[in-house]
Amino acid sequence: MSTTPGDSLDELIVRMDERGALAQIRERLGAGEDPAVLVGECRTGMERVGRLYEEGTYFISALIMAGEIIREAAELLYPRIGAAQAGTATGGGAAAGSGGAKMVIATVRGDIHDIGKNIVVALLDAEGFTMVDLGVNVTPEAVAEAVERERPDVLGLSCLLTSGYEALRETIDLVRRQSSAWHPHLPVVLGGAAVDGMVSDRLGADGWCVDAARGLDFVRALIA
Ligand code: B12
């Protein structure tokens, strides 16, 4: 596929131009651009692919290919997010603002989407949080077990499928029941395309976040 100079990163992702997208990321990182901006553009590209899939223009193969481009982009970008955060004007280094807090995070049972969750993990890790990432398709029992073992300050759950609500509900209920012995109310924050304020309220979570940056602010406020 040919790449026209000046193509935006999200456009390259929409066109499945893997080589062009990765070359642009390398070039812009080399020129000193903020990796968080590039992550945002990758997300826009992924969202556009999602919309094209939704309206029937793209098929599942496009989701898989775009997901693969994002995975490779992440390998270039995530290590740089840490470096960029450590060098911010606050001068606080990677641990600024986290107070050494711990988060257990998982994508719920039945759901294998992890691109967004991995961005959250990279960002919070760069901000000095101790992140315990349980991966994808994690049962309520496995989340509860990890929470019992790790005793985190906050639990994060990612859910991109509307069929995941029951898994979310079971996970939150089980974790709250089991953790009540050592935490009066373990904060639970949700993220992913299937959740919003109404879902969060209905399932008894403490809130939801539309993206990783807001997730960071929200989690900081929750545990403050
Ligand atoms: C890429 C993708 C895939 C890839 C996933 C690759 C991977 N490794 O993750 C593949 C191809 C595997 C896939 C499979 C499927 N997918 Co899919 N997929 C997508 C797509 C296009 C993009 C998701 C994405 O990565 N976005 C980019 C990231 C960066 O954004 P994000 O996930 O929203 O994450 C951000 C925030 O939400 C937030 N966040 C996320 N998690 C968390 C957690 C916490 C704690 C916090 C604070 C914040 C937070 O921060 C993130 C970073 O800013 C979406 C469309 C969409 N609009 O979301 C469909 C979408 C989610 N998929 C969909 C479907 C239907 C499927 C399949 C069922 C398709 C099929 N017929 O097989 C399967 C399901 C497989 C399964 N069991 O899970 C539907 C779901 C519809 C619904 N109502 O349930 C969507 C919405 C597409 C659509 N419009 O129809 N998919």
Image (spheres, rainbow, N blue to C red):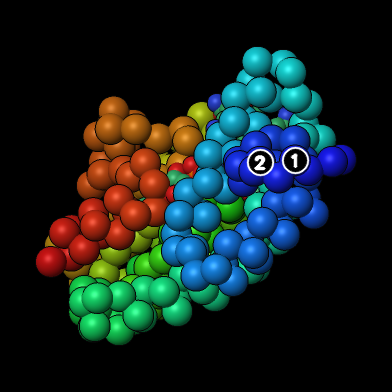
* Residue picked out by circle 2: 7
* Residue picked out by circle 1: 4
Q: Count neighbours of disc 2 (C-alpha within 10 A) and say few if under 14, some if 14 to 19, many if 20 or more.
A: few
In the image, farthest residue toward the right: 1
Q: Position of residue 65 (x, y in %)?
A: 78, 44
Residue visible at 52% across and 46% down in the picture: 41
Asked if 89 appears above or below 9 in the picture, the reply is: below
Q: Which image quadrant: the C terminus?
A: bottom left
Asked if 8 appears above or below 148 in the picture, the reply is: above
Task: Please report contact status of discs 1 and 2: CB closer than 8 Å, yes or no.
Answer: yes
Is 50 on the left-hand or right-hand side of 154?
right
Is residue 117 among the parts visible in the rendering?
A: no
In the image, farthest residue toward the front: 5
Kindly tell me whether mark 2's CB lies below 8 Å from ligand 1: no
Is residue 210 among the parts visible in the rendering?
A: yes
Determine the secondary structure under disc 2.
loop
Q: Where is residue 198 in the image (x, y as percent from the top left)?
A: 29, 28
Is 211 on the left-hand or right-hand side of 135?
left
Residue visible at 60% across and 24% down in the picture: 51
Is 61 on the left-hand or right-hand side of 198?
right
Q: Count neighbours of disc 1 (C-alpha within 10 A) and say few if under 14, some if 14 to 19, many if 20 or more.
A: few
Determine the secondary structure under disc 1.
loop
Asked if 58 appears above or below 152 in the picture, the reply is: above
Disc 1 residue type (three-letter): Thr
Nearest the viewer among 168 and 21 is 21
Q: Position of residue 184 (x, y in %)?
A: 15, 62
Disc 2 residue type (three-letter): Asp
Label 1 and label 2: CA atoms lie apart by 6 Å
Q: Where is residue 187 in the image (x, y as percent from the top left)?
A: 24, 57
Nearest the viewer among 24 and 137 is 24
Asked if 168 appears above or below 134 in the picture, the reply is: above
